[in-house]
Amino acid sequence: MDTTTKPVTPDVWNTAELDLDAYLARVGQRREAPSAAALAALHEAHVRTIPFENIDPLLGRSPSLDLADITAKLVHRRRGGYCYEHNLLFAAVLERLGYDVNRQAARVQPDHPGPNTHMNLRVRVDGDDYLADVGFGASIMRPMPLYDGSELDQAGWPHRLTAEERGWRLHRLKDGEWNAEYAFDEAPQHPVDYEVFNHYVATHPRSPFTGRLVVMRLSDRVCRKLIGEHLVAEYADGTEEKSTVAPADLGATLRSLDLDLDPADLELVRERYTGQK
């Protein structure tokens, strides 16, 4: 028996199903060797290009977490999605490019607490660890160095990481105070874990994504959100603009948020939009 041969690790995440060239074209990036700078550029390009949105759960559909389906939706159909879709896609991209990636879970609003259903990533490159998260609504533009006290400006909003006894906590500075966004540890998750989380988030009546439309876009010093019927622009200086979007204006508003639905889905969303919570 040849004991020098290493066992083949099965590709449980099906990363071979990713159309990497199409993804890179979608976000306007080139293949580059793994580095902290390349990771930051790719992360930012993803957030700037692919919307955060909950169209499928709003319409009573559970988003598929099969990588081929995510690629078809977010890359080829140029749609968006929520955390599992974004971060499963991004994790596969990073692994195909040669990064060391750990898929994790986080508890949103840990001081309340919220559910432990968010997906984030730990990425190791150049000997350092980073928190990467392209699927947290419109919050994190660039990966954060993973060490206690790490601070990084995220498109105008300072964020901080603090170490806890059993993991980490991500904070956002607002009105002069650090508010906890989510808490997480580095326990690796399995595909079935996200299937369970996804079922709850996509179907439970208390989920924030089943009762009203949510679309979010982050750019420099402005975060634009369509929450229910309200279009909100939050600026890094603390000012805010808010307006009500009429059903007839929904298509144009979604396009302004980089989300161009096919006519059938737009009509379904418009019907659901008038009765949302």
Image (cartoon, rainbow, N blue to C red):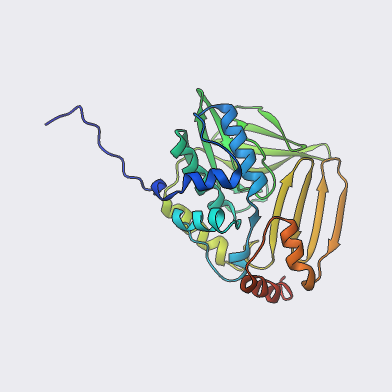
- Image quarter hosting the C terminus: bottom right
Picture layout, residue 274 above or below residue 90? below
Residue in the image at 64% along x and 32% along y:
162
Nearer to us in this view, 259 or 217: 259
Picture layout, residue 237 above or below residue 130? below
- Image quarter hosting the N terminus: top left
Residue in the image at 76% along x and 64% along y:
252
Picture layout, residue 149 above or below residue 51? above
Residue in the image at 53% along x and 27% along y:
35
Q: Is residue 174 visible?
A: yes
Tell me residue 82's x, y (percent): 59, 55
Q: Is 19 positioned to the left or the right of 203 in the image?
A: left
Nearer to us in this view, 148 or 26: 26
Tell me residue 225's x, y (percent): 75, 55
Tell me residue 132's x, y (percent): 58, 38
Residue with the most extreme left position: 1
Nearer to us in this view, 124 or 149: 124
Q: Give the image quarter of residue 58.
A: bottom right
Q: Is residue 168 visible?
A: no
Tell me residue 41's x, y (percent): 62, 34
Nearer to us in this view, 225 or 48: 48
> Total label count?
0
